[in-house]
Amino acid sequence: MEYCFDKGKNNLILYPARKNDTDYSIPNTVTAIEVQAFSDCESLTSVTIPNSVSEIGWRAFEYCSSLTSIALPNCLENLEAETFYDCKNIRKVEYHTEKPVTATEDVFPPTVYENATLYVPEGALSAYENTTPWRYFLNKVETTVSGVILADVKELTDAEYYSIGGLYLGRNSSDLAPGIYIVRHGNTMKKITIK
Protein backbone atom coordinates (compact mmCIF):
# COMPACT_ATOMS: atom_id res chain seq x y z
CA MET A 1 0.00 0.00 0.00
CA GLU A 2 1.19 3.51 -0.84
CA TYR A 3 0.74 6.72 1.09
CA CYS A 4 -2.82 8.00 1.01
CA PHE A 5 -3.63 11.71 0.64
CA ASP A 6 -6.74 13.59 -0.35
CA LYS A 7 -6.93 14.88 -3.93
CA GLY A 8 -5.10 18.14 -3.20
CA LYS A 9 -2.49 16.44 -0.97
CA ASN A 10 -3.64 18.69 1.90
CA ASN A 11 -4.67 15.84 4.22
CA LEU A 12 -2.41 12.91 5.00
CA ILE A 13 -4.95 10.14 5.45
CA LEU A 14 -2.78 7.05 5.82
CA TYR A 15 0.86 6.10 6.05
CA PRO A 16 1.27 2.36 5.37
CA ALA A 17 1.44 0.39 8.62
CA ARG A 18 4.33 -2.04 8.91
CA LYS A 19 6.40 -0.08 6.37
CA ASN A 20 10.10 -0.53 7.19
CA ASP A 21 11.22 3.10 6.80
CA THR A 22 12.68 4.63 9.95
CA ASP A 23 11.96 8.25 9.05
CA TYR A 24 9.46 10.14 6.96
CA SER A 25 9.17 13.78 5.90
CA ILE A 26 5.59 14.88 5.41
CA PRO A 27 5.18 16.98 2.22
CA ASN A 28 4.82 20.77 2.65
CA THR A 29 1.39 20.65 0.96
CA VAL A 30 -0.11 18.84 3.96
CA THR A 31 -2.16 20.94 6.39
CA ALA A 32 -3.78 18.11 8.38
CA ILE A 33 -2.72 14.68 9.60
CA GLU A 34 -5.88 12.60 9.84
CA VAL A 35 -7.14 10.27 12.60
CA GLN A 36 -4.85 7.24 13.03
CA ALA A 37 -2.82 8.18 9.94
CA PHE A 38 0.40 6.63 11.28
CA SER A 39 -1.20 3.87 13.37
CA ASP A 40 1.07 0.85 13.99
CA CYS A 41 4.10 2.30 12.15
CA GLU A 42 6.49 0.52 14.48
CA SER A 43 9.65 1.15 12.41
CA LEU A 44 9.41 4.95 12.44
CA THR A 45 11.91 6.62 14.76
CA SER A 46 11.28 10.18 13.54
CA VAL A 47 8.73 12.08 11.50
CA THR A 48 9.34 15.56 10.10
CA ILE A 49 6.15 17.57 10.30
CA PRO A 50 6.30 20.76 8.20
CA ASN A 51 5.05 24.11 9.49
CA SER A 52 2.17 23.88 7.00
CA VAL A 53 0.43 21.37 9.31
CA SER A 54 -2.11 23.05 11.58
CA GLU A 55 -4.09 19.99 12.70
CA ILE A 56 -3.10 16.56 14.00
CA GLY A 57 -5.95 14.06 14.46
CA TRP A 58 -6.94 11.68 17.23
CA ARG A 59 -4.39 8.91 17.75
CA ALA A 60 -2.57 9.99 14.60
CA PHE A 61 0.66 8.32 15.77
CA GLU A 62 -0.73 5.54 17.99
CA TYR A 63 1.48 2.50 18.52
CA CYS A 64 4.54 4.07 16.87
CA SER A 65 6.63 2.30 19.48
CA SER A 66 10.03 3.20 17.95
CA LEU A 67 9.33 6.92 17.73
CA THR A 68 12.00 8.67 19.83
CA SER A 69 11.67 12.31 18.82
CA ILE A 70 9.07 14.62 17.37
CA ALA A 71 9.24 18.24 16.24
CA LEU A 72 5.81 19.86 16.21
CA PRO A 73 4.92 22.57 13.68
CA ASN A 74 4.89 26.19 14.82
CA CYS A 75 1.44 26.93 13.39
CA LEU A 76 -0.32 24.04 15.13
CA GLU A 77 -3.92 25.00 15.96
CA ASN A 78 -5.50 21.67 16.86
CA LEU A 79 -3.84 18.72 18.58
CA GLU A 80 -6.37 15.96 19.25
CA ALA A 81 -6.55 13.63 22.25
CA GLU A 82 -4.19 10.66 22.43
CA THR A 83 -2.21 11.83 19.40
CA PHE A 84 0.84 9.87 20.56
CA TYR A 85 -1.03 7.01 22.24
CA ASP A 86 1.35 4.27 23.42
CA CYS A 87 4.43 6.04 21.99
CA LYS A 88 6.34 5.35 25.20
CA ASN A 89 9.84 5.80 23.77
CA ILE A 90 9.63 9.47 22.82
CA ARG A 91 12.51 11.22 24.57
CA LYS A 92 12.63 14.54 22.72
CA VAL A 93 9.74 16.87 21.85
CA GLU A 94 10.49 20.15 20.08
CA TYR A 95 7.86 22.84 19.81
CA HIS A 96 9.29 26.21 18.77
CA THR A 97 6.38 28.58 19.15
CA GLU A 98 5.88 31.20 21.81
CA LYS A 99 2.14 30.45 22.05
CA PRO A 100 1.64 26.69 22.50
CA VAL A 101 -1.69 25.16 21.52
CA THR A 102 -3.91 23.95 24.34
CA ALA A 103 -4.84 20.27 24.21
CA THR A 104 -5.94 17.47 26.52
CA GLU A 105 -3.66 15.91 29.09
CA ASP A 106 -3.61 12.57 27.26
CA VAL A 107 -1.87 13.77 24.07
CA PHE A 108 1.24 11.88 25.24
CA PRO A 109 1.45 8.82 27.51
CA PRO A 110 2.59 9.44 31.12
CA THR A 111 6.05 7.95 30.44
CA VAL A 112 6.73 10.71 27.90
CA TYR A 113 5.87 13.43 30.42
CA GLU A 114 8.21 11.75 32.90
CA ASN A 115 11.16 10.86 30.64
CA ALA A 116 11.19 13.15 27.60
CA THR A 117 12.61 16.64 27.33
CA LEU A 118 10.42 19.38 25.88
CA TYR A 119 12.44 22.03 24.00
CA VAL A 120 10.74 25.44 23.87
CA PRO A 121 11.81 28.90 22.66
CA GLU A 122 13.85 31.08 24.97
CA GLY A 123 11.57 33.32 27.01
CA ALA A 124 8.46 31.16 26.49
CA LEU A 125 8.87 28.72 29.37
CA SER A 126 6.10 30.26 31.49
CA ALA A 127 3.61 29.91 28.60
CA TYR A 128 4.36 26.18 28.48
CA GLU A 129 4.23 25.78 32.26
CA ASN A 130 0.72 27.26 32.25
CA THR A 131 -0.71 25.34 29.26
CA THR A 132 -2.02 21.77 29.08
CA PRO A 133 -0.49 19.35 28.08
CA TRP A 134 2.93 21.03 28.06
CA ARG A 135 2.92 21.76 31.78
CA TYR A 136 3.04 18.02 32.51
CA PHE A 137 6.54 17.61 31.07
CA LEU A 138 8.93 17.27 33.99
CA ASN A 139 11.90 18.28 31.82
CA LYS A 140 11.59 21.55 29.88
CA VAL A 141 14.52 23.35 28.29
CA GLU A 142 14.55 26.80 26.73
CA THR A 143 16.58 27.00 23.52
CA THR A 144 17.56 29.76 21.17
CA VAL A 145 17.36 29.55 17.41
CA SER A 146 19.45 32.12 15.61
CA GLY A 147 19.72 33.15 11.99
CA VAL A 148 21.90 31.51 9.38
CA ILE A 149 25.58 31.68 10.22
CA LEU A 150 28.69 30.43 8.55
CA ALA A 151 30.29 27.97 10.89
CA ASP A 152 33.35 25.83 10.99
CA VAL A 153 31.43 22.76 12.05
CA LYS A 154 34.62 20.86 12.77
CA GLU A 155 34.92 22.93 15.97
CA LEU A 156 31.64 21.62 17.39
CA THR A 157 31.72 18.52 19.55
CA ASP A 158 28.61 16.80 20.89
CA ALA A 159 26.46 18.54 18.28
CA GLU A 160 23.34 17.13 16.64
CA TYR A 161 22.57 17.96 13.01
CA TYR A 162 19.08 18.30 11.52
CA SER A 163 17.69 19.04 8.09
CA ILE A 164 16.03 22.43 7.67
CA GLY A 165 12.73 20.54 8.04
CA GLY A 166 13.79 19.14 11.43
CA LEU A 167 14.81 15.59 10.44
CA TYR A 168 17.62 14.27 12.66
CA LEU A 169 20.71 13.55 10.52
CA GLY A 170 23.24 12.45 13.12
CA ARG A 171 26.31 13.81 14.89
CA ASN A 172 28.87 13.69 12.08
CA SER A 173 29.03 16.85 9.95
CA SER A 174 31.40 15.23 7.46
CA ASP A 175 28.47 13.10 6.21
CA LEU A 176 26.48 16.21 5.21
CA ALA A 177 26.31 17.61 1.70
CA PRO A 178 26.75 21.37 1.21
CA GLY A 179 23.62 23.25 2.31
CA ILE A 180 21.77 24.82 5.22
CA TYR A 181 21.20 22.78 8.38
CA ILE A 182 20.09 23.20 11.96
CA VAL A 183 22.67 22.31 14.58
CA ARG A 184 21.94 21.79 18.27
CA HIS A 185 24.89 22.31 20.55
CA GLY A 186 23.99 22.14 24.22
CA ASN A 187 20.82 24.20 24.69
CA THR A 188 21.45 26.34 21.62
CA MET A 189 20.15 25.76 18.11
CA LYS A 190 21.50 27.56 15.06
CA LYS A 191 21.05 27.44 11.35
CA ILE A 192 24.37 26.86 9.67
CA THR A 193 25.67 26.76 6.14
CA ILE A 194 28.04 23.99 5.17
CA LYS A 195 30.07 24.68 2.04
Image: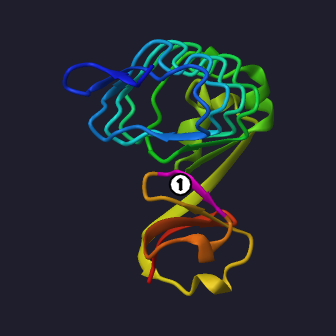
Q: Residue furthest left?
A: 8
**Quadrant of the rendered image containing residue 56:** top left
Q: Which residue is mark 1?
A: 123
Horizontal arrangement in the rendering, residue 123 relative to residue 172 (left or right): left
Residue visible at 71% across and 20% down? 109
Residue 140 appears at what percent x and percent y? 68, 45
Residue 5 seen by the camera: yes
Residue 181 appears at what percent x and percent y? 47, 67
Please tell me how crowded label 1 is: few (under 14), some (14-19), or many (20+) other residues with Cα within 10 Å. few
Q: How many marks?
A: 1
Q: For the stretch drawn in magenta, what is the main secondary structure?
A: strand
Q: Residue furthest front?
A: 1
Residue visible at 69% across and 24% down? 87
Comparing 186 with 84, the one in front is 84
Horizontal arrangement in the rendering, residue 84 relative to residue 65 (left or right): left
Residue 70 seen by the camera: no
Residue visible at 66% across and 18% down? 63
Above or below for 125 versus 110: below
Horizontal arrangement in the rendering, residue 44 relative to residue 6 (left or right): right
Q: Quadrant of the N terminus?
A: top left
Comparing 154 with 23, the one in front is 23
Magenta stretch: give its range. 166-170
Comparing 8 with 32, the one in front is 8
Above or below for 42 versus 143: above
Residue 101 appears at what percent x and percent y? 45, 29
Residue visible at 67% across and 25% down? 42
**Quadrant of the rendered image containing residue 139:** top right
Q: Amino acid at mark 1?
A: Gly
Q: How is the image coloured?
A: rainbow
Helix, strand, or loop for circle 1? loop
